[in-house]
Amino acid sequence: MQTAADAGDAAARLAAVPAGHRVALVDPRFVGHVHALRLGLTDPRFPAAAVPGALTAQPEARGALMRALRRATAAVGAGAPVAGPDADADAAPEDRTVPGRIAVALEAEGTAVKRPELGSLTAAVPTDAGARAAAESARDQVDDEAVRLRSAVKAHDGFFTTYGISPYSRYIARWCARRGLTPNQVTTASLITALIAAGAAATGTRGGYVAAGILLLVSFVLDCTDGQLARYSLQYSTMGAWLDATFDRAKEYAYYAGLAIGAVRGGDDVWTLALGAMVLQACRHVVDFSFNEANHDAVANTSPTAALSDKLDSVGWTVWARRMIVLPIGERWAMIAVLTALTTPRVVFYALLVGCSLAACYTTAGRLLRSLTRKARRTDRAARALADLADSGPLAQGVAAVAPGLRGGFTAPVVALLGPLVMIGAALFLPYGSWLTVAAAAVYALLSGLAVARPLKGALDWLVPPFFRAGEYVTILVLAARSDVPHAVPAAFGLVSAVAYHHYDTVYRIRGGTGAPPQWLVRTIGGHEGRTALVAVLAAVLTHTSGFTTALTALAAAVALVVLVESIRFWVSSSAPAVHDEGELA
């Protein structure tokens, strides 16, 4: 920390700091909470941020900061405005300090400056003794640490997490912070704990099931703690966002596999139920993702249904009831843990299938009503995101390239639904191994290409990716279950897990603003229609032979290898922004 005599001296001192370092300007008269400064000066997610009397710039904003500081120095010396006549006069009207003026100048140049919500925290630059006394009094009346602990908890969470976990997990987060532990270390501990829980469930004994249920809850406590630790210590990172996003799915699906293995050891084969639960959960998520991507930047985004939802939010108990109905991760894991300890894996999967089905019906119905009643125009960015989420491979892309765009506001989702219905119907009702199933896969590929032949800007076009996910996942499930080949369903479980990872990875790349995975990756793993057709061909060629299991296993390993290598390369080496989920309940 260095003290500058004036703005010119500050510019000279900042110029001497190595270019790769973050820098900050703080008015020496600043009065406020330490956590207010921490929020303004240490959050790594934003190139520039400010609170009254303080400004920070990361390396990517250093050039703009230096230019603004030099202009401000010259302007103040000449008695002229800092930011020019076109600047937003309301950007920071209460902050006339040098950092405040520089923040306005940065925004005038086009550099976004994050101004965190301080709530009850104090951050002020008093200009006289009375104002200083008032600021100090306001600061002393608020417990800085208590605010920091409260703000570590996610703003919108489920009932079980809010009242059953967060009241004590925030203190675990503080304990971890004081001992130098990072969120990534806690995330990894949560994964390891869940994998041990899956191993305990795989024993197939009552003691193992009880231990598995307890360990799953411990894993969830750690899962909450890692995010709270990140918010408490402002240790956001690209790697942390990726680990947090993907490990939740890995933990849950590994636990499903552990339960299925334990059930088989007890004489009850529930692999089909386990795969069905995973398929249903993954399809629920893609409905959430597609709807949000289609509508988060829609123009004129209004709806009577949304207005009714806002009114219900004003009634306290309805908020919690609606959050519990969707069976978010906290409620879901609590239910799984308790039922594992007290019942059997079959009961666990029945409860999951029923609960997730009801939740899916509730959320999807609400989103359909919103989509049909809102008057909004989809943007090109939303259409691109939906096309990326569709995961169309060479077959569908080839059809889309030569087919005329279908007219009509609802034709894309109707055609996208028709394809999976044809494919799943063939897999279910045609003789197993029939080449007519392969013909149905060709029809599915054709209809998939027609569905994405035009930009997905219709009111219900967000349904296209979920229909494709259901078509692929359910087809693999049905063909494996009908094959009567030993271990075919566990192999299918592995294949769907690998493909689902690719789809989740696509979602989080889009959320991070970096776009979907490269086209070479999508082409290499075939796209949803290519993989579906390949599984149909394998079922026809390797009918009722162990080669079908071997082929599914090899396909799962190949997809997993390609997808994981590219995903790890991207998240480790990219400069993608740290995106942490503050509102997703899934």
Image (cartoon, rainbow, N blue to C red):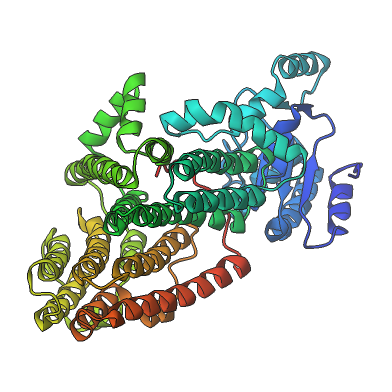
Q: Quadrant of the C terminus?
A: top left
Is residue 231 among the parts visible in the rendering?
Answer: yes
State the residue in front, 334 or 130: 334
The residue that appears at 50% across and 58% down in the rendered structure is 512
Residue 110 occupies which quadrant of the picture?
Answer: bottom right
Q: Position of residue 360 (x, y in %)?
A: 25, 45
Q: Quadrant of the N terminus?
A: top right
Q: Where is residue 455 in the image (x, y as percent from the top left)?
A: 25, 67
Is residue 301 among the parts visible in the rendering?
Answer: no
Side of 228 where 303 appears, left or right? left
Figure disc tally: 0
The residue that appears at 64% across and 29% down in the rendered structure is 149
State the residue in front, 425 or 93: 425
Residue 331 occupies which quadrant of the picture?
Answer: top left
Q: Check the image and report above or below for 307 versus 59.
A: above
Task: In the displayed orientation, state which residue is furthest to the bottom.
Answer: 541
Q: Where is residue 185 in the image (x, y as percent from the top left)?
A: 66, 51
State the residue in front, 64 or 167: 167
Q: Check the image and report above or below for 162 versus 87.
A: above
Side of 105 where 179 appears, left or right? right
Q: Check the image and report above or below for 236 versus 533.
A: above
The residue that appears at 48% across and 45% down in the rendered structure is 208
Side of 262 where 568 appears, left or right? right
The residue that appears at 36% across and 49% down in the rendered structure is 296
Q: Position of residue 174 (x, y in %)?
A: 69, 34
